[in-house]
Image (cartoon, rainbow, N blue to C red):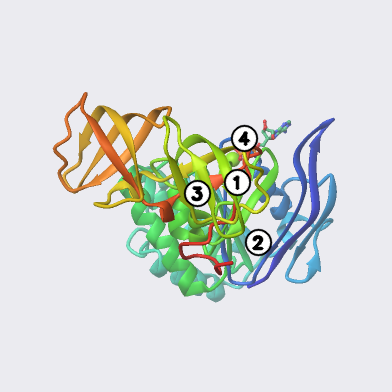
Amino acid sequence: MAEVELRKAWKRYGDIAVIHGIDLQLNSGEFVVFVGPSGCGKSTLLRMIAGLEEISEGEVWIGGRNVSQVEAVDRGIAMVFQSYALYPHMTVEENMSFGLRMSGTPKEEIAKKVDFAAKTLQLDKLLDRTPKNLSGGQRQRVAIGRAIVRDPDVFLFDEPLSNLDAELRVEMRLQIAKLHNQLNATMIYVTHDQVEAMTMADRIVVLKAGHIEQVGSPLELYHHPDNLFVAGFIGSPRMNFLDVTVREGSAAHAIVELPGGGTATLAVDASRATPGSKATLGVRPEDLARESGDFTLPMQVDVAERLGGSTFLYGKCGGMDNFVAQRAGLDTTHDGDTVDILVGADTCYLFDGEGLAYHRLTQSGRAVA
Ligand code: ADP
Ligand code: MG
């Protein structure tokens, strides 16, 4: 177990910066997920922590030690990659024990560690197989086993489940979460999949173009996104965004003019808003599945998608062409219908013209202001 810290960490390739002076502190034993769109710098950041990528400026600390100049093998970390990177000619047992054998670890100790990892990952019946005789999920478990036997202070995962099918991803997600509970190790997990981030993380770090957009628990990010980017990235289907105009703002509320007329009073701290300023009202599809509301928005439904337990309506609403509303149960709306969408003021989000959130005064997840 060890805490991990980045201090003004930069990564540049020539003149181009891909990581922009990141400051980040991770607690010992914490499960932290780096999430963001492809190319935002997640792998680079992880590799900088691992020592596989030199940092251009700044420092990396692991377990209270400045490891910026320390070789990867001496940082007390173990990394698991998307491409399992197993030796094809070696058995499961040999793959898992390879690193220990190379470092001259005594035989009994190797046997004990491999046995523990194999039991933990339910690989004990597969020790004599070679990778080509394993399923994708089993191969990924061997790759994780190889990390476990090293007894690292910090586990680093780079999109380890991306090559697996949907069902297996869910299963492996649970297995990694269990592993974290069992080992109590510090884990940093990189993914572009916000569902993985939401379900696995103690804390999520949202990255965009080499900058941190927000750090927080999954529900903090869900209920209190700092900006439009985080609001749009966390949650599935995506939050709907409507263009509105602020009519009046105070520390306790905002009155906004809705697209197509009418107003809504929202429970946000809009003390910094100027009347007449442009803003974005956000509302999540799942928050529209209610029988009552504080205001209504007419929606022209293009497609109604019935999933059995719930229904998704896709269409035009509030000036948006790709509005999504979730309804509970089997909804009788037909394609082409116009329906009234009921919106609860307490479920809304509001962002200023720069995309920064007006702090919400309702919902759980962070101390109410
Ligand atoms: P992610 O893992 O979030 O998809 P990466 O960390 O792999 O993103 O990449 C971040 C950015 O750094 C990308 O724009 C990528 O093109 C750039 N990059 C990565 N490696 C190199 C390299 N060796 N030389 C130049 N640019 C690189
Ligand atoms: Mg990557």
Residue 39 image label: 4
The residue identified by callout 3 is 349
Residue 153 in percent (x, y) is at 64, 68
- Is the residue indicated by label 4 positioned so its CB lies within 8 Å of ligand 1? yes
Residue 77's tag is 2
Determine the CA span between mark 2 and mark 1. Answer: 33 Å
CB contact under 8 Å: marks 1 and 4? no
Instruction: Give the Cα separation between the discs numbered 1 and 3.
Output: 10 Å
Between marks 3 and 2, how big is the CA–CA gap?
40 Å
Q: Are marks 2 and 4 in contact (CB under 8 Å)?
A: no
* Image spot of residue 211 (x, y percent): 70, 44
What residue sits right under mark 1 in the picture?
A: 227
How far is mark 4 from mark 3, CA to CA?
Answer: 28 Å
Q: Nearer the viewer, mark 1 or mark 4?
A: 1
Q: SS class of the residue under badge 4? A: loop
Tell whether 301 sits left or right of 266. left
In the shown orientation, is residue 349 left or right of residue 205? left
First reached walking from the N terminus: tag 1 or tag 3: 1
Q: Residues within 10 Å of mark 4 (few under 14, many from 20)?
A: some
Residue 93 or residue 27, whichever sits in front: 27
Q: Amino acid at mark 4?
A: Gly
* Three-letter residue code for mark 3: Tyr
Label 1 or label 3, whichever lies nearer to me, is 3
